[in-house]
Image (spheres, rainbow, N blue to C red):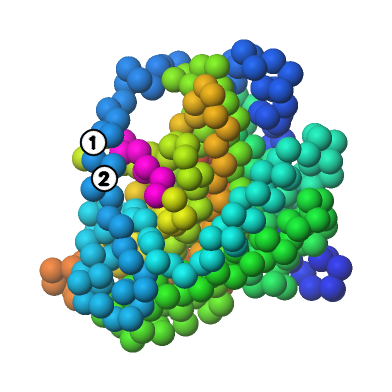
Amino acid sequence: MGVDNGDHEEVPSWGTSLPVECVQEIVRKDPSNVPEKYIHDFDYTQTDVVLTHLSSDIPVIDLSLLSNGDEIELQKLDLACRDWGFFQIINHGIEAQILQEVKENSAKFFELPIEEKTKFSMASDDVQGFGQVYVVSEEQKLDWADLFILVVYPTKFRKWTFWPTTPPEFIKAIEAYSSEANRVAKELFGSLSILLGMEKESLLKLHDEVMQALRINYYPTCSMPDKVIGVSPHSDTSTLTVLLQDDEVTGLQIRHSGGWVPVKPIPNALVLNVGDVLEVLSNGKYKSIEHRAMTNENKVRMSIASFMCPQDDVQIEPLDTMVDGTNNERMYKRIRYGDFLRYSLQRKMDGKSHTNLIKFRE
Ligand code: OGA
Ligand code: NI
């Protein structure tokens, strides 16, 4: 199914989600109100081990060194993708002003009155716009967050009716940042190609053309932060995800050593993570790690995720270079990326359970 984007191009739809209340509005009306639908049966502080002391072990990679062919940095990237599935990058070359402006304009959009934001509400047949995703039943527990999703690249997939013209600089800021995030991801694709035993250009070519979706996460404050979750544990269905997170408020936590490790913000750095596609291509050498976001009582947190994905028609499967028939058996089935993405988007998010569809063995 698709809609006309005004340029007579058919834009595909990747999924649907049931409409939910705006959490920001719930809190605005009554900061102490936490409806039943958001309250989990357990207290996170009682059930989970949070390994705060490991935060400083999450790898930090210097992109300028890496892109200049530095061998030590390349080995760091390999270790980061194998042992953590997450890393931060510094010296990425994105001007601080571009980061500032995309954050400011995203915040200004969420500060608009609800009547303005709902002009961009997700349609019933797609997940672009203002709303939520992965909501498939009236019974399921909901995440304490509001989202805004846009497909940015290829530009022919833009549904312009969902691109806000207030704040006036919003579109410009999104375009400037997204183009830089795209460049950063492509530089990483070059290094990853080498680590996966291929020519530098191979990973990018395999994508056909990178499909890039932007997801702005808005996590309102919550009077019961230990009973709700900002985003439920999941792995990303992308190849790589580039996350621009708040410089001060910690919320993201990743699975490691049997617990959850908070990703402490490094000002102006980007958080990168391995998605399901890279796990499949690398035949499980690199893992798409489960992560979640927690909320807090006093501070709104925002983050901007850019998902770098292959085109719908690309077949994903372990690379020949990663399978040798003796030591390295094929761990994943071949699947058309568009089918995998649509399958994932029609289920409730539940850790990595959506990847069972393509696994031969644990
Ligand atoms: C996501 C995500 C984490 C965060 O958008 O997929 O995992 O910190 N976000 O907001
Ligand atoms: Ni994620």
What's the amino acid at mark 2?
Ser
Ligand 1 within 8 A of label 2's CB? Answer: no
Instruction: Give the x, y percent position of residue 88.
Output: 37, 56
What's the amino acid at mark 1?
His
For residue 56, the mark is: 2
Query: Which residue bears the numbered disc 1?
Result: 53
Mark 1 → mark 2, Cα distance in angstroms: 7 Å
Q: Quadrant of residue 68?
A: bottom left
Q: Are marks 1 and 2 in contact (CB under 8 Å)?
A: yes
For residue 263: magenta?
yes
Q: Quadrant of the N terminus?
A: bottom right
Is residue 309 shown left or right of residue 57?
A: right
Q: Quadrant of residue 319?
A: bottom left
Q: Is residue 325 above or below residue 84?
A: below
- Residue beneath the point at 59% across and 61% down: 97
- Residue beneath the point at 46% across and 32% down: 294
Instruction: Give the x, y percent position of residue 109.
Output: 73, 45
- In depth, the one of 110 and 314 nearer the eye is 110
**Range shown magenta:** 260-266
Instruction: Give the x, y percent position of residue 8.
Output: 84, 73
Disc 1: CA contacts within 10 A as few (<14), some (14-19) or many (>=20): few
For residue 267: magenta?
no
Per the image, label 1 sits on a secondary structure element best described as helix
Is residue 142 shown left or right of residue 174?
A: left
Q: Is residue 132 visible?
A: no
Per the image, label 2 sits on a secondary structure element best described as helix
What residue occupies the far top of the structure in this picture?
32
Tally the marks: 2
Is residue 259 shown left or right of residue 143?
A: left
For residue 324, the mark is: none
